[in-house]
Amino acid sequence: MLTPIAYSLAVVLSLFIIFIGARFLVQPVAAASGYGVPAKPAGDAAYLTIKGLRDLTSGVIGLALLAFADADAAGWFMLAVALVPLGDTLIVLRHGGTKATAFGIHFATAVIVLISAALLFAA
């Protein structure tokens, strides 16, 4: 029973980060606002594209590991990739974002990703 839950959560997280990455590529200003640090009107396009590509790629790697590797490999990936939302928490706090966004979105995401890693290791 644990294995389907572990894989389902990891798939949902991977698809979600693909969606976020795609949104940064298609609607960068709106995505930046949702991230918690609004984009400057005249010049964050390259950085927003980098973020979109990073997130999209992370999600694709997660799905590839889930499809073609074992649960331990996917668990290690989730453990490592949890650094991203932890770092995002600090970025939002350092650049004028709200604590609600930093902790309610980014830190909470890191916790969920760590739970996903633990479930994959246990599967």
Image (cartoon, helix red, strand yellow):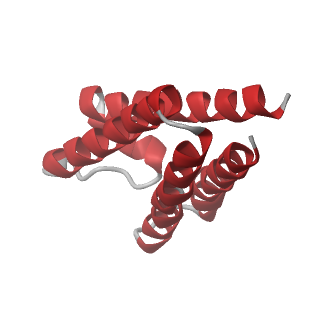
At a point 38% along the width and 32% down the height, the residue shown is 60
4 left or right, relative to 55: right
Asked if residue 20 can be seen in this view, the reply is: yes
Quadrant where the N terminus sits is top right
Residue 25 x/y as whole percent: 25, 32
- Residue projecting furthest to the bottom: 94
Residue 72 x/y as whole percent: 59, 47
- Quadrant hosting residue 74: top right
- Quadrant hosting residue 98: bottom right
- Quadrant hosting residue 103: bottom right
Name above or below for residue 12 compared with residue 74.
above
- Residue projecting furthest to the right: 1
Residue 57 x/y as whole percent: 32, 38
Q: Nearer the viewer, residue 111 or 61?
A: 61
Residue 112 x/y as whole percent: 68, 48
Quadrant where the C terminus sits is top right
